[in-house]
């Protein structure tokens, strides 16, 4: 499902371009090199700076299939919690604006972008290199799952090791067949999700729990896919059928509570 990249040198794995003068003081545009060798361009990203001088714990935020911006409220909230957050745009350098119905962009390729962002963050003086996690939603949630697996870490050998924490919202779990975890994992699902039904995730999470893996799962009974995006109720049409998306304020508030506690446990 994802490309194998052996022998990556993280010492030269990023290129930084700063355009901070044109941005708000708490945001910065940069670019870095992905660990995905098939992408010929650097990956553009936005860095959200918390208040203060740091160094900070940090998060790599992996977007859904429509690209960045859907989760800006989450990124601003994480920033307010004191985390430095980087959101790569994995679609633009590959010539995509959306991959929701095409399947042209793999979860593994996005996970490799996440490793490039991890290397970039660990190079920054205002980041605590041993306190970097990953958070992802939908397509990015599946990439976060892959990022938490021992096989992925062994294959790509990031300098400094795996993420210290991984959080995944309503991902596709079909490619996730790990027997253990390289990072503690928080899995947040909607029972009414008809885009990525949670049954595979629940089955895998319970198997990991039985093996003693560091996983926490919460399933919100009436929540759909994208339950934390504050938009009016909507549907999306795909060749295989219609999916329903509905904002759930209670599930969103509870997921923030769980994310806050999980990050306090693993990134502080």
Image (tube, rainbow, N blue to C red):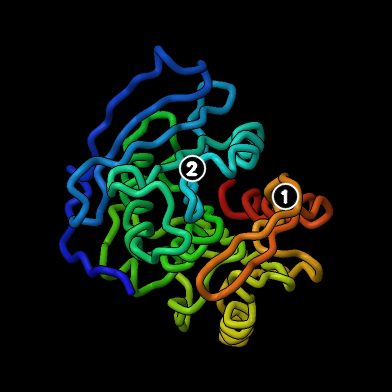
The answer to whether residue 27 shows anywhere in this view is yes
Give SS at disc 2.
loop
Rounded to the nearest angstrom, the CA distance separating label 1 from label 2 is 20 Å
Q: Which mark is residue 68?
A: 2
Which residue is located at x 48 percent, y 67 percent? 145
Give SS at disc 1.
helix
The front one of 229 and 189 is: 229
Farthest residue toward the top?
Answer: 21
Which residue is located at x 54 percent, y 60 percent? 138
Image coords of residue 217 (percent x, y)? 67, 70
Which one is earlier in the sequence, the residue at label 1 or at label 2?
A: 2
Image coords of residue 117 (percent x, y)? 36, 45
Image coords of residue 62 (percent x, y)? 47, 51
Determine whether, in the image, residue 91 is placed left or right of residue 248: left
Corner quadrant of residue 43: top left
Point out the frontmost of discs 1 and 2: 2
Farthest residue toward the right?
Answer: 250
């Amino acid at each position: 499902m994802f490309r194998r990249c052996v022998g990556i040198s993280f010492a030269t794995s990023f290129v930084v371009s700063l355009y901070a003068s044109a941005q708000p003081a708490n945001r910065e545009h940069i670019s870095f090199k992905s660990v995905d060798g098939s992408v010929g361009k650097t990956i553009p990203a936005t860095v959200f700076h918390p208040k203060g001088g740091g160094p900070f714990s940090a998060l790599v935020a992996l977007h859904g299939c429509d690209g960045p911006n859907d989760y800006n409220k989450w990124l601003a909230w994480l920033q307010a919690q004191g985390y430095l957050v980087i959101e790569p745009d994995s679609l633009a350098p590959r010539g995509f604006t959306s991959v929701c119905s095409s399947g042209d962009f793999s979860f593994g390729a996005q996970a490799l972008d996440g490793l490039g962002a991890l290397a970039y963050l660990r190079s920054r003086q205002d980041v605590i290199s041993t306190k970097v996690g990953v958070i992802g939603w939908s397509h990015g949630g599946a990439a976060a799952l892959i990022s938490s697996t021992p096989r992925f870490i062994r294959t790509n050998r990031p300098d400094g090791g795996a993420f210290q924490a991984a959080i995944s919202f309503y991902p596709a779990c079909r490619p996730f067949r790990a027997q253990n975890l390289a990072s503690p994992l928080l899995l947040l699902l909607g029972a009414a999700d008809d885009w990525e039904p949670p049954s595979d995730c629940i089955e895998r999470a319970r198997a990991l729990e039985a093996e003693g893996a560091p996983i926490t799962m919460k399933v919100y009974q009436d929540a759909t896919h994208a339950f934390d995006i504050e938009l009016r109720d909507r549907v999306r049409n795909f060749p295989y059928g219609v999916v329903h998306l509905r904002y759930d304020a209670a599930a969103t508030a509870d997921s923030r509570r769980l994310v806050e506690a999980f990050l306090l446990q693993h990134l502080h």
